Amino acid sequence: MDFDFSDDQEALRAAVRRFVDKDYPFERRRKTVATGGFSAEMWQALAGLGLTALAVPEAHGGLGWGPVEAMIAMEELGRGLVLEPLAQGALIAPALLAAGAPEVAAQWLPRIAAGDALVVLAHQEPRARHRLTAGQTQAREQRLTGHKSLVPAAAHAQAFLIPALDLESPASTSLYLVHRESPGLSLRPYALHDGSSAAELHLADTPGTRIAGPVAGQALLELAADIGIAAQAAEAVGVMERLLELTIDYMNTRRQFGVPIASFQALRHRVADCKMQLELARSMSYYATLRLTDEPAVRRRALSQAKVQLGQSMRFVGQQCTQLHGGIGVTDEYLGSHFFKRLTVMELQWGDTLHHLGEVNQRMLDTAGVFA
């Protein structure tokens, strides 16, 4: 299998890296965190790079590129700790809208491609514990009632994609699009530990537009989760790679007993272990991306396997690199601590490591030859 990137893909990587290095410095990120964890100016800058159009079909004004290009972009954005939710607004939302009602897709996809609209998935609920089939939000005659939690950048979104139990088709999930200004919708925004923006979303007989019926709704929700995991895996690789670079630079600069601490064999071994975990994560990120186009059963298992490895790598690299910095590694003024915060938050998103370990276990029962 050829893992070399094409010239166009390498050009995309170079363009996003230039943007991160030049237009998204640490101080700009700190300012964005202080003003709510989202910058409309930076979202327009991402649109100017073509990133909001990345996964939008060409028929709706997008680039129509695939999962590999999305992986490249997310990896580079991870290196810069970019707060704006590109995966939610430019990868997940276009995939769901393109597969849903054509009239809704025609209305929203061109706006998403141009960076004029942010549409995010609101699927988590307080008692669901990462389970995609445990939501309790209900819909009757396209009016929704329920509570969604940890909705990314909700205070800055123009619309939400919301899965709900369709009472007209018992025990089935439909997918709805709900406008931000719809009656009965209320938000309670807050900041996450890494500085990004999220909110609690409450629905009280709120009107919505059904974009996928009871059979397709659950399948689309699972696809959205898998796209989110693959995008997060790529972002995590970028975060870990940059954090490891910072750590090595620090070790070459910090001196103890008259020599750089990078010369200490025990610390060099820890860096080597971090590098190994990074490359394991990179391999599983590639694996997750390439499996996105497989049939659902194969795809779901592969993405859970990737999330298990990414969770282990993120925890190991984050903790080891922070310890190798000593006390400075946990100070808010130092860039490295923010990489650690981001890795900690990501390990809990889209299902934590233990959740996906259980998912992998359940999907191996038919082939492991151990359980009946």
Image: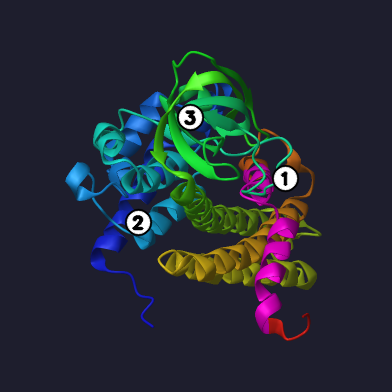
Closer to the chain start, of discs 2 and 3, is 2
Residue 97 sits above or below residue 1 on the image: above
Q: Is residue 122 left or right of residue 15?
A: right
Residue at 79% in and 70% down: 266
Q: Which residues are magenta?
A: 339-367
Circle 3/circle 1 CB separation < 8 Å: no
Q: Position of residue 97 (x, y in %)?
A: 35, 42
Q: Which residue is mark 2?
A: 13
Work out which quarter of the rendered image holds the C terminus and state it: bottom right
Q: Which residue is mark 3?
A: 28
Closer to the chain start, of discs 2 and 1, is 2
Inspect the magenta stretch and tell me whether residue 55 lies in it. Answer: no
Report whether residue 85 is seen. no
Q: Nearer the viewer, residue 251 or 30?
A: 30
Report whether residue 207 is seen. yes
Pointer 3 local density, CA inside 10 Å: few below 14, some 14–19, many at least 20: few
Residue at 29% in and 46% down: 56
Residue at 78% in and 53% down: 323
Query: Helix, strand or loop at disc 2?
Result: helix
Q: Main secondary structure of the magenta part?
A: helix
Which amino acid type is shown beneath numbered disc 2?
Arg
Q: Which-is-in-front pick, marks 2 and 3? A: 2
